[in-house]
Image (cartoon, coloured by chain):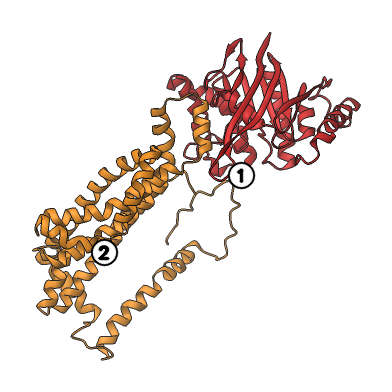
C-alpha cells in the first residue's frame, strides 16, 4: 500500500474536497497524465523504424539507441565527453554570473551609467554569440579558452541586462519606506535593492543557462577534441548513427539537469513569492 | 509644548511646462502652511486632491526640504529622515521577502537594537495589532487589512514619538477600515503617540482626529482647523449618530464644498 504525505494545507486557502476515493489512485492518475505523451513518443520512435515507416539507418529504433548509449556509458567514452562539456559550460556560466551580477548592480544603481551603457549592451545582447564564434577562434584559438569565452560571452548579456532592469525597477515605495527609517545607502542596497532584485536576476540566469548549452555544443561542433558537440559530429561523419542519437539524448539530459538545478535555486531564493 | 510646528512652509517644484515644449515652470504645491500639533495629539489632515497632502508628508519625513519656512519637531528643524517619526503608507510598503516578523524587525535593526531584543519587541507589537499567530507569514499570504496592521506594527516597533499616516486605510474595504480605525484609536490611547493622519474621507477625519486640518488646493494652504469635541470615541458604539459628530462632519463638509473648491476635482 502506497501512502502519500499530504502537503501541508495553506491556511488562507480552503482545502479542496478530494474527488477520487483513494490517494494512491490519484497519484497514479497524476503520474499517468505526466508521462503518457512521453511514452507515446518513445513508442513511436521505437516502432516507426521497426515497421519500416522511416529508414532504419537514419533513425534507429529507440532500443538500439539506448543500447548504444549504455555501451558508451560503460566504456567511459560518454562520461569523457559529458565531463568536458559540463565543465566548460559551468566554468563559462559561473564566470559570467560573477562578472555580470555585480556589474549589473552597479550599472543599475547609477542612472548615468545605465543611460550611457544600455544601448551598447542591447547591441551585444542581440548579436548572436555564434556569429562571433569565428572571431573567438581567430583570436583565442580552438583550445578551451575560446570555448569558455564564448559561453561567458553568451551568458553575460541576459544576466547583466536583467540585473540592471531589476535594480531599476525596485518598487520606489519600498525604497522610500526604507529611507524614511534613516538607513545608510549601503544597507539600503544590501537589505532592500538586492533582495527585491533577486527574482528578475534569476530570469536572466535561467536564460543564460539555456544559452550556455546551446552555444557550447555549437562551438564544440566546429572545433574541439572532446565534448558532446564534438562527439555528435564525429559520430555523424563516421556513420555511427545510434551513437549520434545517444549523444543527442545526453545533451537533452544535460539541459534538463541544468534547468532543474536552476529552477530549484530560483525557488529557494524566491520562496517569499507564491 | 508643541510637538510639531509648521512655520510658513512653502514647497515649490519644477515641473514640465505643458504649453511650452521642453520648458519647465515653477509649481507651488503648498504655500505658507502654518499650524502646530500638540504632544500626544491625534490630528487629521483632509483636503481635495492637489492640496499637497503627499508633499506635506514627504516634508515631515525629511525626504524633501521646504523651499521656504521650516518644520520643527521638539523645537529642532527637520533636516532629514529619522526614527523619531514612523510612517505608514497607503500601499503598506512591506518588504515582500520578509515575514511579518521580519518586516517589524527591519525597523528595529535600523535603530540598532540588538538581535536578541528584536524578536521580543516584534512579538509584542504583533500582539498589539492582533497578529500574534501570523508572525511567520509572508506579506502575500496576508489580507490587505493584515498587511496594514503589520505596517503599523513596524512603524510603532522602533518607538517613534510621531506616527505619520498617509491615507493608510484608503485601499481597504469599508468593514476592515472601520475595524482598523477603532484599533488605531485604541493603540493611540495605549501608546500616547502623536499622530498625523492624512485622509480624503471626511467621516474618517472627524471620527479619528481631535482636530481636523482642512486644506484647500492649488496651492495647498490651511483653510481652517476644526476642533472635534468628541470625548469617548471608543466607548460610544454609535458615535456617528452623535450630534457633535454630525455637526463637526457638516462643518468640514461645508468647508470642502465652498465655492473656491468648485472645479478643484474634489
Task: Report the residue that reaches farthest toward the front.
Answer: B20
Is B247 in front, or is A8? B247
Task: Report the residue that reaches farthest toward the right.
Answer: B243
Chain for numbered disc 1:
B
Q: Going 68% across and 13% down the picture, which residue do you hit? A: B39
Task: Report the residue that reaches farthest toward the bottom.
Answer: A52
* Residue A268 visible somewhere in the drawing: no
Please identify the quarter of the rendering in which residue B42 is found: top right
Chain letter of the red region: B
Residue A48: percent from the left, percent from the top? 29, 86
Please identify the quarter of the rendering in which residue B166 is found: top right
Is A235 in front, or is A127? A127
Q: In the image, is B39 to the left or to the right of A40?
A: right
How many numbered circles are shown? Answer: 2
Mark 2–mark 1 distance (CA, rounded to whole Å): 59 Å
Q: Going 59% across and 57% down the picture, which residue do you hit? A: A16
Q: For marks 2 and 1, give the one nearer the viewer.
A: 1
Q: Residue B18's mark?
A: 1
Chain letter of the orange region: A
* Residue B116 visible somewhere in the drawing: yes
Q: Indicate whether B147 appears above or below A53.
A: above
Q: Residue A253's mark?
A: 2
Residue B61: percent from the left, percent from the top? 57, 24
Q: Going 39% across and 44% down the picture, which residue do you hit? A: A115
Q: Indicate whether B103 appears above or below B18.
A: above
Q: Indicate whether B192 appears above or below A118.
A: above
Amino acid at each position: 500500500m502506497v501512502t502519500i504525505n499530504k502537503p501541508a494545507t495553506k491556511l488562507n486557502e480552503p482545502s479542496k474536497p478530494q474527488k477520487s476515493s483513494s490517494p494512491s489512485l490519484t497519484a497514479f492518475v497524476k503520474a499517468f497524465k505526466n508521462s503518457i505523451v512521453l511514452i507515446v513518443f518513445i513508442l513511436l520512435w521505437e516502432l516507426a523504424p521497426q515497421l519500416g515507416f522511416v529508414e532504419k539507418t537514419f533513425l534507429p529504433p529507440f532500443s538500439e539507441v539506448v543500447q548504444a548509449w549504455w555501451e558508451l556509458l560503460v566504456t567511459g567514452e560518454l562520461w569523457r565527453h559529458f565531463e568536458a562539456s559540463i565543465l566548460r559550460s559551468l566554468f563559462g556560466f559561473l564566470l559570467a554570473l560573477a562578472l555580470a551580477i555585480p556589474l549589473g548592480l552597479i550599472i543599475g544603481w547609477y542612472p548615468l551609467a545605465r543611460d550611457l551603457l544600455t544601448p551598447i549592451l542591447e547591441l551585444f545582447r542581440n548579436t548572436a554569440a555564434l556569429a562571433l564564434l569565428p572571431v573567438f577562434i581567430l583570436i583565442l584559438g580552438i583550445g578551451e579558452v575560446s570555448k569558455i569565452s564564448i559561453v561567458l560571452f553568451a551568458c553575460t548579456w541576459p544576466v547583466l541586462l536583467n540585473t540592471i532592469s531589476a535594480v531599476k525597477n525596485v518598487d520606489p515605495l519600498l525604497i522610500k519606506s526604507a529611507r524614511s527609517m534613516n538607513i545608510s545607502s549601503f544597507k539600503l542596497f544590501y537589505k532592500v535593492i538586492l533582495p527585491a532584485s533577486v527574482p528578475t536576476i534569476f530570469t536572466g540566469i535561467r536564460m543564460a543557462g539555456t544559452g550556455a548549452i546551446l552555444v557550447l555544443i555549437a562551438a564544440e561542433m566546429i572545433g574541439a577534441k572532446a565534448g558532446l558537440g564534438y562527439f555528435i559530429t564525429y559520430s555523424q561523419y563516421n556513420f555511427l548513427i545510434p551513437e549520434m542519437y545517444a549523444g543527442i539524448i545526453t545533451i537533452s539530459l544535460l539541459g534538463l539537469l541544468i534547468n532543474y538545478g536552476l529552477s530549484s535555486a530560483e525557488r529557494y531564493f524566491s520562496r517569499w513569492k507564491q | 509644548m508643541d510637538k510639531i510646528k509648521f512655520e510658513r512652509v512653502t514647497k515649490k517644484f519644477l515641473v514640465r511646462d505643458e504649453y511650452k515644449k521642453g520648458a519647465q515652470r515653477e509649481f507651488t504645491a503648498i504655500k505658507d502652511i502654518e499650524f502646530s500639533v500638540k504632544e500626544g495629539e491625534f490630528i487629521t489632515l483632509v483636503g481635495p486632491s492637489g492640496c499637497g497632502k503627499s508633499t506635506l508628508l514627504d516634508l515631515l519625513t525629511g525626504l524633501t526640504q521646504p523651499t521656504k519656512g521650516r518644520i520643527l519637531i521638539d523645537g529642532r528643524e527637520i533636516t532629514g529622515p529619522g526614527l523619531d517619526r514612523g510612517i505608514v503608507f497607503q500601499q503598506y510598503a512591506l518588504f515582500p521577502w520578509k515575514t511579518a516578523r521580519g518586516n517589524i524587525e527591519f525597523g528595529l535593526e535600523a535603530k540598532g537594537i540588538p538581535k536578541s531584543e528584536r524578536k521580543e519587541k516584534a512579538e509584542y507589537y504583533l500582539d498589539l495589532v492582533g497578529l500574534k499567530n501570523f508572525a511567520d507569514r509572508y506579506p502575500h499570504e496576508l489580507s490587505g487589512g493584515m498587511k496594514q496592521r503589520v505596517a503599523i506594527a513596524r512603524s510603532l516597533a522602533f518607538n517613534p514619538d510621531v506616527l505619520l499616516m498617509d491615507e493608510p486605510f484608503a485601499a481597504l474595504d469599508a468593514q476592515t477600515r472601520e475595524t482598523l480605525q477603532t484599533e488605531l484609536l485604541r493603540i493611540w490611547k495605549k501608546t500616547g503617540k502623536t499622530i498625523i493622519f492624512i485622509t480624503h474621507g471626511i467621516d474618517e477625519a472627524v471620527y479619528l482626529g481631535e482636530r481636523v486640518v482642512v486644506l484647500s488646493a492649488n496651492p495647498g494652504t490651511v483653510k481652517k482647523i476644526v476642533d472635534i469635541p468628541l470625548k469617548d470615541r471608543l466607548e460610544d458604539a454609535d458615535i456617528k449618530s452623535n450630534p457633535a459628530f454630525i455637526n463637526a462632519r457638516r462643518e468640514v463638509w461645508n468647508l470642502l464644498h465652498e465655492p473656491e473648491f468648485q472645479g478643484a476635482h474634489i
